[in-house]
């Protein structure tokens, strides 16, 4: 196998690694919210900061996919255009949830903690379905790309961050 083929096949694996990192971070956010609800006092500033950092990372990931990875894939694999369009539509749905979460996080309190946790639960379900479908539908195409760009350029989060 050539170096270009090895690098290309790494893109599919790196997408999965990024998704796994995001899954882990979202579970951590949910756990921290649950701990806060149960009275494990952690400064609200830290809780809010971690939630907002997750929101930014997920937004960067989806933005880079929509602006970089998906156009590259659509050009090389026109038959994927409908799938890529549906994935982008999912990204808009996720962005709406993140906007609501960001607004709620501005004033995390005992009164809205259940609402924030509900948004996180809904986001978790949507993202798991989205990530699994995306991985099934585009990983093979990513593995066929040559020098389309780095994982950071295509996915918005470097594989090094994803593995760390």
Image (cartoon, rainbow, N blue to C red):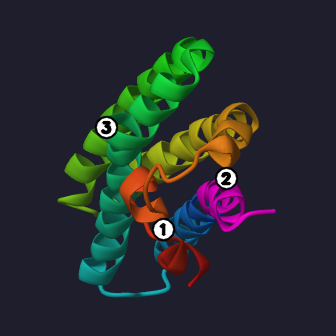
Q: Which residues are magenta?
A: 1-16
Q: Earlier in the sequence, mark 1 or mark 2?
A: 2
Packing grade of label 3 (10 A; few <14, some 14-19, many >=20) is some
Residue projecting furthest to the front: 2
Residue beneath disc 3: 67
| C-alpha span from label 1 to label 2 | 32 Å
Residue beneath disc 2: 12
Q: Nearer the viewer, mark 3 or mark 1?
A: 3
Question: What kind of element bears circle 3?
Answer: helix
Residue 126 in magenta stretch: no
Q: Nearer the viewer, mark 1 or mark 2?
A: 2
Q: Earlier in the sequence, mark 3 or mark 2?
A: 2
| C-alpha span from label 3 to label 2 | 18 Å
Vertical position of residue 102 compared to residue 28: above or below: above
Q: From the viewer's perspective, tell me whether residue 118 is left or right of residue 6.
A: left
- Residue 38 seen anywhere in this rendered image of the structure: no
Query: Considering the image in quadrants, where does the N terminus appear?
Result: bottom right
Residue beneath disc 1: 33
């Amino acid at each position: 196998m050539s170096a270009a083929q090895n690098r290309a096949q790494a893109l599919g694996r790196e997408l999965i690694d990024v998704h796994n990192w995001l899954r882990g971070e979202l579970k951590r956010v949910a756990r921290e919210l649950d701990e806060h609800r149960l009275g494990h006092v952690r400064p609200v500033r830290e809780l809010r900061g971690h939630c907002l950092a997750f929101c930014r990372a997920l937004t960067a990931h989806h933005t880079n996919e929509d602006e970089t990875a998906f156009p590259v894939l659509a050009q090389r694999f026109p038959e994927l255009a409908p799938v890529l369009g549906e994935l982008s539509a999912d990204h808009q749905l996720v962005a709406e949830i993140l906007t609501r979460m960001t607004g709620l996080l501005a004033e995390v309190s005992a009164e809205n903690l259940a609402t924030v946790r509900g948004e996180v639960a809904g986001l978790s379900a949507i993202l798991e379905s989205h990530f699994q479908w995306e991985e099934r539908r585009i990983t093979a195409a990513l593995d066929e790309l040559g020098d389309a760009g780095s994982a950071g350029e295509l996915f918005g989060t470097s594989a090094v961050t994803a593995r760390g």
